[in-house]
Amino acid sequence: MKKLKLIIRREFLAKVKNKSFIVMTFLSPLLIVGIGFLVFFLSKKNDEKVKKIVYVDEYQLFNKEDFKDSKTIQYTDYTPIGIEETKRKVEEGNYYGFLYIPKKDSLETLAKSIEFYSKDSPSMSVISNLENKVETKLRHLKLDQLGIDSEKIKASRIPTNIKMYNFSGEESSKLINGLKIGVGLIAGYLLMMFVMIYGTSVMRSVIEEKTSRIIEIIVSSVKPFQLMLGKIIGNASAGLLQFFIWGIILLIISIVSSSVFGIGMTEVQTSKLSPEQIAAMKEVAGNGTMQLAIQEFFRLPLVTIFVLFIFYFLGGFFLYSSLFAAVGAAVDNETDTQQFMLPIMLPLILGVYVGFATVINDPHGPISTIFSMIPFTSPIVMLMRVPFGVPWYEIAISMIILLFTFVFMVWMAAKIYRVGILMYGKKPTYKDLYKWLKYKG
Amino acid sequence: MSNLLEINNVTKKYGEFTALNNISLSIPKGSVFGLLGPNGAGKTSLIRIINQITLPDSGTILLDGEPLQPSHIEQIGYLPEERGLYKSMKVGEQALYLAQLKGLSKTEAKKRLKYWFDKFDIAAWWDKKIEELSKGMAQKVQFIVTVLHQPKLLIFDEPFSGFDPINAQLIAKEILQLRDEGATIIFSTHRMESVEEMCDYIALIDKSNKIIDGKLDDIKRQFRTNTFQVGVKTKNPKEIENLLKEKFEIFPTDFRMLSEGYTANVKIPENESPNQLLSLLTKCGEVQHFLELVPSANDIFIQAVNKNS
């Protein structure tokens, strides 16, 4: 036990003291936030440029009330100038484009014959904005023609929101479902990244010991199994520390930025949408969306998610990194690892795909359920399912299967590891690995 | 108990390949035991079994009378042929780590490291990384790490490779000093002159089998051929040759005598005293050179291995 502790300590320090670890840990959250700000800043800058749009309304339907100037778009009525002259002016001058509303017999034919001219192809948001304006106007006109009071129509629109409950009395909503998907996907994806990054790091550390030939000295002092276990635990702790630091840094940054610059993280996230879209969203959802989302978020079974996250994190990591360690032991250098890496990576990637494809639509369907039991995909798929509420016995079965598989895999990997670390030269085949499994002592 | 290590009928197979076939060895306490053999003979397999890196398929090993067990790891020091240290770790940190893995406490390890670093005059390297050191420098660190926990049994596999003659001499002196202080040393090498210089006992392993073992002097006696190198100052070498031919077998020799005369290797029949040859030679002229050709470890090695194949 004392020796295991020593090994864990060394592996942990070797990883943490590494320059790339320090850079990754402290720089990547700054980079992520920095890029976020950059996008926000650029899109804001982009929107500051006012787009000048002119319109020629031969029908004489629209007035300045319909084409109100917004922060980013300025409308001008060029109807008196005439279409040909306007076209020429727009083409030569500094205009975004011009909207042509011809004179037609009916509103229906008019709706199909409105045209927009611009030098470059216009942005989707501008066009849909224009279409919206025209459509609204035409609807009102049509309603008037039909003699229907538009106020009454407005009054007849009663927003409906079906409240969803499960039988344990928890209330859910579309919003919370979205949140569950988000939390699940992020957790599953994080797990996969963690396993890949730190699994290969375990492998690299094994190869390093082999190529530097220190391995024979170490195994004359400790059991290969202890060394392997120490490596895995040391790397896992380094990884957990990294995530922990990331969490804290992100938290600090978001607090500081929202209080100092008055820019909340939420605003940074939504900045990718154009201001028009945001306005539209706000109309639909009401202004309290963010607060609501936060409230809903805290109603998720967060403690359960967190505990299971740690469990599957560690279980999955142990399972996979023992395989990575065995691969590292089997080869002499990193270029030889490819043929063994693929079968390890495959179930990981499969887990994420299955999660993305099935859990979102049907978190408790047969495919999601089966894949959340198979130990190689269960850490990822089960983590994605957990926010939707999984019966305890399913979680228990999945955990037990994972636990047993991980003990078995560590045992098997240790056998390959023990033989492999002392083998140099020939690149082993799968047949060789099988033979190593059968070697005694 | 005069043997520190008793190896009894050890066999080890890797699949179809037999690495060690029924090997038995006794290694006396306080001796330097040369473990010799051509490449691929099975020396490393045997050393790994003694170090408990691998287990034998059959056979037993006793260390100080007890069957080999995990706690014995702390009583064995091993310097493998293929050496290495963590490249990016600092010398001091690394030495401390390896010493602690051998069961030393941190404070004790520090104290002893200071002693050895001062002795080898390398205290200034403490905070250097291994990758900044030359190969020879790293070897010194490795040697210290091997002996630091004062093991009863030390196993050196080619300990002089990578050292210049001066440092090799220094290490050889240290090894003999450790023996004098009571350690038992297993010494595996291909450099036969260092076997002559250092080993009290040897065992020769070839093709997974032990072909010779015992005290070096006894083995030499076994391999002696009763051949003498002679040199006589004379004007008439032909005469002597004819005289000798009647009684002995004569072979050409390759040493150089300073004065003009007759030189040869003369083999005398068993149970006959060399005095007879000597008295014959003194009659013919001034005897300047008379030396028994004792087989060197090198000769024994080559002869035994050739005979075995």
Image (spheres, grey):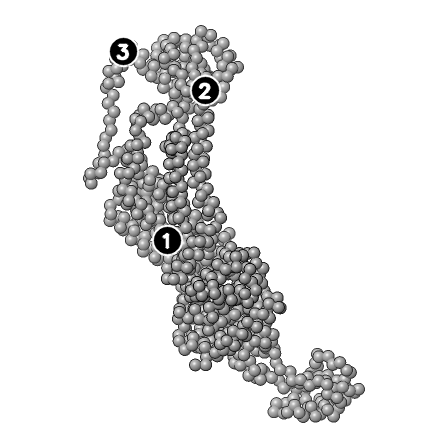
Q: Amino acid at mark 3?
A: Leu
Are the residues under marks 1 and 3 on the same chain?
A: yes
Q: Is residue A214 above or below residue B297?
A: above
For the residue pair A18 and A235, the one nearer the viewer reads as A18
* Mark 2–mark 1 distance (CA, rounded to whole Å): 57 Å
Q: Secondary structure at mark 3?
A: helix
> What mark, if any, has residue B116 been given in the picture?
none
Q: Which amino acid does the dot numbered 2 rest on?
A: Val
Q: Residue at x 46, y 26 (%)?
A: A45
Q: Is residue B283 left or right of residue A184?
A: right
Q: Label 3 belongs to which residue?
A: A146
Q: Is residue A371 above or below residue B60?
A: above
Question: B194 left or right of A158?
Answer: right
Q: Chain of mark 2?
A: A
Q: Residues within 10 Å of mark 3 (few under 14, many from 20)?
A: few
Instruction: Give above or below for A295 relative to A230.
Output: above
Nearer mark to the viewer, of 2 and 1: 2
Place of residue B57 in the rendered image (x, y in percent of width and height, measured from the top left): 41, 71
Q: Quadrant of the N terminus of chain A?
A: bottom left
Query: Which residue lies most toward the right here?
Result: B235
User: Splitting the image into 4 quarters, where does residue A125 fall?
Assistant: top left
User: Between residues B220 and B305, which one lies in front from this camera angle?
Assistant: B220
Asked if one can make out residue B248 in the rendered structure from this viewpoint, the answer is yes
- Residue located beneath label 1 in the image: A319
User: Which residue is label 2 attached to?
Assistant: A50
Residue A390 coordinates in the image, percent (x, y): 26, 44
- Amino acid type at image mark 1: Leu
The quadrant where residue B200 appears:
bottom right
Labels 2 and 1 within one chain: yes
